Image (cartoon, rainbow, N blue to C red):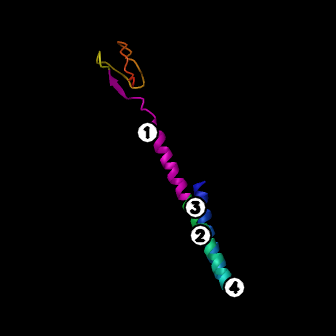
Amino acid sequence: MRIIFKTVGIISICITVIAALIAMFQNPVIALIGGFLGFVNGALMFVVGGLMERVNDLEANMTSVQRPSPGRRMACERCGKLYGVGQSKCPYCGNDTSVDLP
């Protein structure tokens, strides 16, 4: 979708410039106003495409940070053996590692 916005923005700018140059001989004021508005429209579509690209990149980074890596391990405070970070108790001695906040 972002590529479509960028492409349509560039095409819109090109068509607007050509149309404004052609209309300049008919009515210069209308040509300038239409050219300006068309140029702004194309530029905004191009910018929206770029913003969509940045949002997708940020969302990709957020989801990769939130997922715990499956290979991470930690040592039990009581027996010292290694087990997965996602487990709330040590599978060897049963030591509860969950933290209760007051």
Residue 31 among those drawn in magenta: no
Residue 19, how many percent across, how many down? 66, 77
Q: Quadrant of residue 30?
A: bottom right
Q: In the figure, 12 relative to 87: above or below?
A: below
Name which residue type carries label 1: Val
Residue at image point 28% right, 18% down = 80
Query: Given the current orientation, which residue lies at the most extreme right position?
Result: 26
Residue at image point 63% right, 71% down = 38
What is the quadrant of the C terminus in the image?
A: top left
Name which residue type carries label 2: Val
Name which residue type carries label 4: Asn
Return the residue at label 4.
27
User: Do labels 4 and 1 touch, CB within 8 Å?
Assistant: no
Return the residue at label 3.
6
Return the residue at label 2.
40
User: Do labels 2 and 3 touch, CB within 8 Å?
Assistant: no
| Secondary element at image label 3 | helix
Residue at image point 61% right, 75% down = 36
Residue 78, how many percent across, how many down? 29, 16
Q: Tag 3 or tag 1, which sits nearer the N-term?
A: 3
Horizontal side, residue 45 vs residue 93: left or right:
right
Q: In the figure, 21 relative to 8: above or below?
A: below
Crowding at label 3, few (<14), some or many (≥20) Cα neighbours within 10 Å?
many
User: Do labels 1 and 3 touch, CB within 8 Å?
Assistant: no
Q: In the figure, 102 relative to 52: above or below?
A: above
Return the residue at label 1.
65
Q: Give the magenta part as a residue range.
A: 49-75
